[in-house]
Image (cartoon, rainbow, N blue to C red):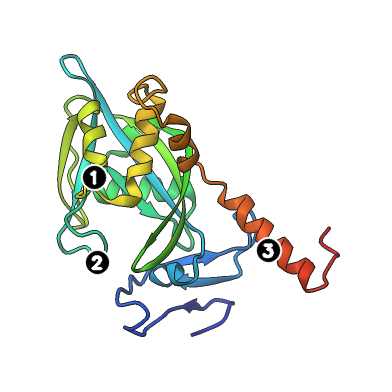
Amino acid sequence: MARGGGYCITISSDRLNPILLFQCYEVRAAFSKCPLLKMDRSATCLFGIRQYGVDINGYVLCPERGMCVWLQKRAASKQTWPGKLDNMVGGGLSVGFGILETALKEAAEEASIPRSILDQKLTPAGSVSFFFESERGLFPNTEFVYDLELPLDFVPNNSDGEVESFELLPAKEALDKIFAPDFKTTSCPVVLDFLIRHGFVSPDSEPEFPQLIELLHVPLQSLYNRTQKSRRLENGDISSN
């Protein structure tokens, strides 16, 4: 294990974490602060460190079927969530990459979306934040979201070997898919948020609508910063007040 500077902390013990992804994330006290250190993506969940990612909701407006959403099926060779259905494009915010830069990179690698379409149609759509726990660890995730209207004749094509196939579904069918066991759990909030914003889930159709909204926007920044402040006070450091 290395500390700070230009090093990347990795965990190599199979007992602790059998899946090393060899992709580093920056660890920060707050998203706006300078990074304290770099850590292998697979190790962050062992410590409950906040993770950040970027997702693109690709959709088309079909004359016959209405709004349709592109979903991908992850390759069986993927180390995490192999063979699961997923959002059309998504990736972690790795060291050295900005949010928009990550969106453009993943769009090209995962779906071969032309830069001309991205420049014209890629639209920031906020973020979702949620907390997920599994046998691998704790995942306090924030996903920066983009919407992308695609031409009717566009068909995504994977170029990095991480996607098995793509499927275009009417929005209402996509809503059923995201709650199925074969859908990637941590991508469900992204697609659900998209469907809420476009009126396919509403307070009239979903009795638990207020709870859904809360679960899609867990205040991770405030919760973590509050904990950090409390610990500073307990240690006698009151200069931060």
User: Extreme front residue here?
Assistant: 207
Identify the residue at image location x=41%, y=27%.
197
Q: Earlier in the sequence, mark 2 or mark 1?
A: 2
Cα distance between the residues tagged 2 and 1: 19 Å
- Front-most of 148 and 51? 51
- In the displayed structure, does residue 4 sit left or right of residue 205? right
Identify the residue at image location x=41%, y=32%.
208
Give the residue at mark 2: 79
Could you tell me which secondary element the residue under label 1 belongs to?
A: helix
Q: Earlier in the sequence, mark 3 or mark 2?
A: 2
Give the residue at mark 1: 111
Tell me whether the residue at label 2 lies in contact with that at label 1, contact meaning CB atoms closer than 8 angstroms.
Answer: no
Is 24 located above or below residue 84 in the figure?
Answer: below
Q: Specify few, some or many for label 3: CA neighbours under 10 Å numbering under 14, 14-19, or 20 or more.
A: few
Task: Give, as a three-letter code, the residue at label 2.
Answer: Gln
Q: Specify few, some or many for label 2: CA neighbours under 10 Å numbering under 14, 14-19, or 20 or more.
A: few
Is 98 located above or below residue 229 in the figure?
Answer: above
Pinpoint residue 95: horizontal percent, then vertical percent: 48, 63
Q: Which mark is residue 228?
A: 3
